Image (cartoon, coloured by chain):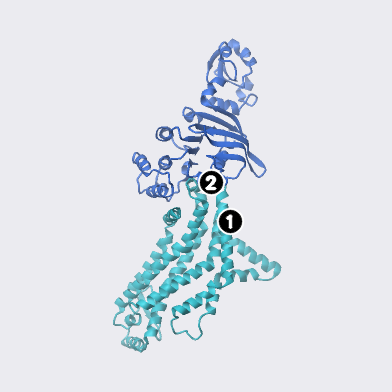
Chain colours: A cyan, B blue
Amino acid sequence: MNNLIWLIRREVWENRSLWIAPLVVAGVILIIAAFGGVHVGRGDNVSLGWHNDVPEMSEHDRENIRNAVSAATIEHKELIYAITLSTFTAVQLFTMVFVLFFYLLDSLLAERKDRSILFWKSLPVSDTQVVLSKLLTAAIVVPLFVLVVSSALQVLFALVWSARFSGTGLGDALMAWHGPTWLKLQASFVMFLAAGVLWYLPIIAYLMLVSVWARRNAFLWAVLPPVAILAIEGLILQSNNFGQFLGHRFIGAFELMEKNIPPGRDDDMLSLADVVNVLSGVFTSPETWIGLLVAAAMIFGVIRIRRLRDDS
Amino acid sequence: MTAIIEARGLTKRYGSTPVVRGVDLNVEAGRIVGLIGPNGAGKTTVIKSILGLTSFDGELRVLGHDPRTQRDALMEEVCFIADVAVLPKWLKVSQAVDFVAGVHPRFDRKRAEDFLAKTDIKRESRVRQLSKGMVTQLHLALILAIDAKLLVLDEPTLGLDLLFRRSFYDNLLNDYFNKERTILVTTHQVEEIENILTDVLFIEHGKIVLDSPMESLAERFAQLTPTPGNVDRARALKPFWEREIFGRVAMLFDGRNQDELAALGEVRAPSVADLFVAMMQPIGTASPSKEAA
């Protein structure tokens, strides 16, 4: 356990993009919120932009927004609050997927490229601990950190926004702070991430397997085999079973969630019970658990290969 | 005495090419053993087998552990420097010390700090900012602070200038070596380590061709420079190697009576470097200058 903590710390030292990227994204969003332009479209559409090129709102527009806001129910306001804040977490999660993809591909290749593996292997840390530390970094440490940054970003954004636009209607449209909704959002995201990590663990393990196997060009090794299988299957069998299988691995978790969204609730916030119910589609699907078994087998392979990898 | 390294029939092939062919070894505690051989002789493969970095056939026990299956336990008692340049470039000096202190139960942080204090290495530097010599000093500071029973050094001074090489071995002897510790070292620069070794092992084509304590080398081997009239009589005693320099012939003998040789000319103990050259290039394959003569 002690070794694992040091090894995870090592990952954070080596891969600074893991924690810098979410902070940069949060910073950019806050700068746009504080200084960026605001576009008010037809109806009550509001969007943020880079350029501060929005003319002063006409009194007519302000009036419209004020009326819309005052007519909105508290539930409606909560929904706007929740959707706006969720957008930022979504941006952060998207960035995280991108950063983790490259982190994982490099995770067991970089140490062989610069031969530093000989230094790490001279210390009493086992291959199992090293591989697990990288897996835990990608599957737990980074997602939790991104979530914490996103949660803080949500709060700061709402505060900045409300302060900047207080009294204009835009400020009132987005609540500055609504504790229960915010907490509910965070709880939902934790569960959502847990479901996501479980579902995508085979992909994480696959990328690590490529990383420990490849001598260079891990990206190509990760991408070309699936593409080749797709092409060969298409040419010879004239079918696309592998493509469907892959596509399902990529978006299947969302399909499983969608099944459990209660009908006719488009305009209301889902309750926590609803969220649990939606995500349970992922947790209870045999596909998730079969995927986990496959991931475990691949991680076992990664440990074996790192143990016996002999590049010189 | 307890055997630190015990090998019987250690064999390794890459594909169908054998690199190590049935090596037997017996290294006891408190020795400094030089494993010496030309490139491709199998030195590094033997070292990697001992450190559990590669698979192999045959029997091998290091501190009683099988490196194939008990590597994790082994690494608590063994440390090694496999190559000077292997510290990762992104690592800060302070992080390196913290990390080793964090994971190694036998690491003495103060020792490492004291050693570093004697160098110009700054705590906040990353490895990529250090000179090659400083990287070696840092690595040495980390390794020497580990209370290991066996230290394995594979070409530890490759690419370093003479000053660093000299102080590297001085540090090793003064700050590290004692009766409970054992050092196994490979190097190209035989002449630099021959006076610190207690034992030599020559390896060629994957086989051990010489395994001897230093003190018995002088008893077994002799270098004779016969006086001009005695060259043919000296040859009749079957030297296993000879060469001609400045018109005089030097011959190496294995197991000849030294008094018998002394009658024919000047006798002295050969250096390890001379022996190495001689044993790697036996008569018949030697330098073209002799064919001409």
x, y percent for residue B172 = 43, 35
- Check disc 2 and give the amino acid type: Arg
Of B155 and A170, which appears nearest the observer? B155
- Image side of residue A254 versus residue A143, left or right: right
Residue B68: % across, % down: 57, 45
Q: CA distance from mark 2 to mark 1?
A: 18 Å
Q: Position of residue B215 (x, y in %)?
A: 51, 23
Q: Which amino acid type is shown beneath numbered disc 1?
A: Gly
Q: Residues within 10 Å of mark 2 (few under 14, many from 20)?
A: many
- Residue that numbered label 2 is attached to: B71
Q: Nearer the viewer, mark 2 or mark 1?
A: 2
Chain for disc number 2: B
- Report helix, strand or loop for mark 1: helix
Q: Using the rendered image of the protein, determine whether residue B270 is visible from the camera's viewpoint.
A: no
Q: Residue furthest right?
A: A236
Quadrant position of residue B108? top left
The residue lying toward the viewer, choosing from B289 and A223, is A223
Q: Badges 2 and 1: C-beta atoms under 8 Å apart?
A: no
Quarter holding the N terminus of chain A is bottom left
Q: Quadrant of residue A8?
A: bottom left
Badge 1: residue crowd in 10 Å (few <14, some 14–19, many ≥20): some
Give the residue at mark 1.
A301
Q: Quadrant of residue B235?
A: top right
